[in-house]
Image: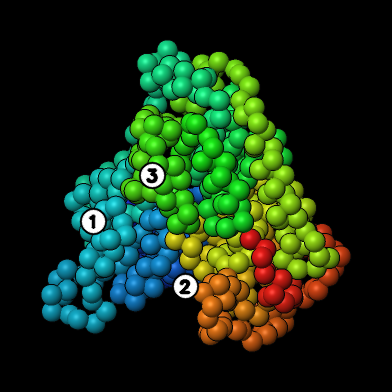
Amino acid sequence: MPDMDTSTAPRVADTVAATLYAYGIRHAFGMPGGEVVTLIDGLERAGIAFHLARHETAAASMAAGASVTTATPGLLVTTVGPGLANAVNGIADAAQEHVPLVVISGIVDRATRARYTHQVIDQAQMLRPLVKASFEVEPESAGSTVARALAIALTEPMGPVHLDLSPAVAAMLDPAPRVLHPTLISTPSARADDPAILSLARDLSHAERPLILAGFEAARANAGGHIVRLAEAIGAPVLTTYKGKGLIPETHPLALGGAGLSPLADAVLLDLVRHSDLILMIGYDPIEMRLGWLDPVIEAERIAEITAAAPDHAMHHAATRIAANTGAVTAALATTVSPRKSWPGGEPMRAKSQLEAHFATQADWGPHAIIDAINEAAGRDGLVTVDSGAHRILLSQKWVAARPLSLLQSAGFCTMAAALPLAIGAKTADPARHVFAVMGDGGLEMGIGELATLRDLGHPVTIVVFQDRSLALIALKQASAGLAAAGVSLGETDFATIANGFGGHGVCVETAGDLRRELSVASNRNQFTLISCRFDADAYQNAF
């Protein structure tokens, strides 16, 4: 790590930045203001690149994309008042998506704060419902305060923390410079002879119809390979949340894909859940599931959970919970259970066939065909982000994930316009990865300024826009409620011309062949590509 300049005493900002660097942070995203210029200088000196976004909420999503990609905390920098207030949506998203996001905001100097009112609000109070902790950095304890905040952010369940830093304190020479490094946390291996492991292994070995439901926590714990071995040993079908997709390769016979927002899929999967005699939930948080997943089974004795930290919900009740690292416990179970055949009636295979039929591509053009083309272009190693809307639900069902954390989305908070900044953050953190952002036209129009961020960073991200000239998901909900469409129609924006104006390559397509050709050549460009796919919103009827 770059050392602090020892020729002069380090500033408080330098201590803050050096501590952030020690915890693995290499990228910061945000909008500068006069109150954070010294902090940004300190970040750059420490080796943390500051990336200019066009909106603070987008910057928070960029930090989230970088965090998931690198398994390190994300860093958002905002100025006082309106800067931090602009970021509230992004911080709330980080809270519900369990992102260890460090939010550092400028604040008016203490000496004038009580008298001065311009842009002065109680910033800690504003964020109190959204962050795990909020502190103001003081000169005597800057390094310790930052380290404390980072430790809180990284403790399961992970989440955002907030630090206020005034310009006078940031510029002050640190009276007691001290850079703290993260504590080395060793997680003991779960022993196969542990009574809790043995008890759960016996239950699984005796179950005739076991089922595994896995989520995002399991993906972050690298539990995928252990889940595959466990599922194969006991013949358990595996379904995941959308953010857990790929924990088991979705071409595997036992993989049933993602669940949570599609009524068509949920009808099939919930029926299978109700027929299961033991449901093993591994790193599962139902925050992204629809209301149909409230109490998927009533009998608590049919549910066992493995989780590092129990999520805060009342969506179901489990009779048994092992509170430990999901990867370690699943690995121990996989070696302890007695292999056996299960589901003698063949219900999981029938469910898999039903799902494939429900989401099969029938037309030559439309959302189904567009998703097929993106899936082919992304391949095994591509990373895809997807925005909220009808296209996200369909893509999350049709997408065939080969590995975990390759499909990023706002699944708990379901905020719009998240796909582009998530893609920017992921590409910034891993420039060699081929990254795709899949968006609706409404989401892109909401956050279109981030095309300038993409241009300035020089990232060749491929953006695919589902241009149906509608807020299609809301229109479908209005129709299902017997209501007339209102406030959901969009005019037709020339996204290709706009992309060219932002310095990228823009094109509009209306056939699958043209889309495939454009996706193929996009990978060879050194600037971003935006492909607008025009189709009628009616193509979503009965699609999910």
Drawn side of residue 103 relative to residue 331, left or right: left
Which three-letter amino acid code belongs to the residue tagged 2?
Answer: His
The reply to whether discs 3 and 2 touch (Cβ–Cβ < 8 Å) is: no
Q: CA distance from mark 2 to mark 1?
A: 24 Å
Closest to the camera, between mark 3 and mark 1, is: 3
The reply to whether discs 2 and 1 touch (Cβ–Cβ < 8 Å) is: no
Q: Quadrant of the C terminus?
A: bottom right
The reply to whether discs 3 and 1 touch (Cβ–Cβ < 8 Å) is: no
Question: Residue at the spot x=55%, y=15% of the render?
Answer: 338
Rendered position, 462 above or below 68: below
Q: Mark 2 = which residue? A: 55
Query: Residue 37 placed where, x, y %?
Result: 37, 68
Which three-letter amino acid code belongs to the residue tagged 1?
Answer: Phe
Rendered position, 372 above or below 254: below
What numbered label is drawn on residue 316?
A: 3
Front one among 205 and 381:
205
Question: Residue at the spot x=56%, y=30% of the render?
Answer: 209
Rendered position, 189 above or below 519: above
Who comes first in sequence, dot 3 or dot 1? 1
Q: Residues within 10 Å of mark 2 (few under 14, many from 20)?
A: many
Q: CA distance from mark 3 to mark 1?
A: 35 Å
Q: Residues within 10 Å of mark 1 (few under 14, many from 20)?
A: some
Q: CA distance from mark 3 to mark 2?
A: 38 Å
Question: Residue at the spot x=62%, y=56% of the render?
Answer: 264
User: To which quarter of the image does residue 404 belong?
Assistant: top right
Rendered position, 45 above or below 179: below
Query: Residue 511 placed where, x, y %?
Result: 83, 70
Q: Quadrant of the N terminus?
A: top left
Q: Mark 1 = which residue? A: 135
Who comes first in sequence, dot 2 or dot 1? 2
Which three-letter amino acid code belongs to the residue tagged 3?
Answer: His
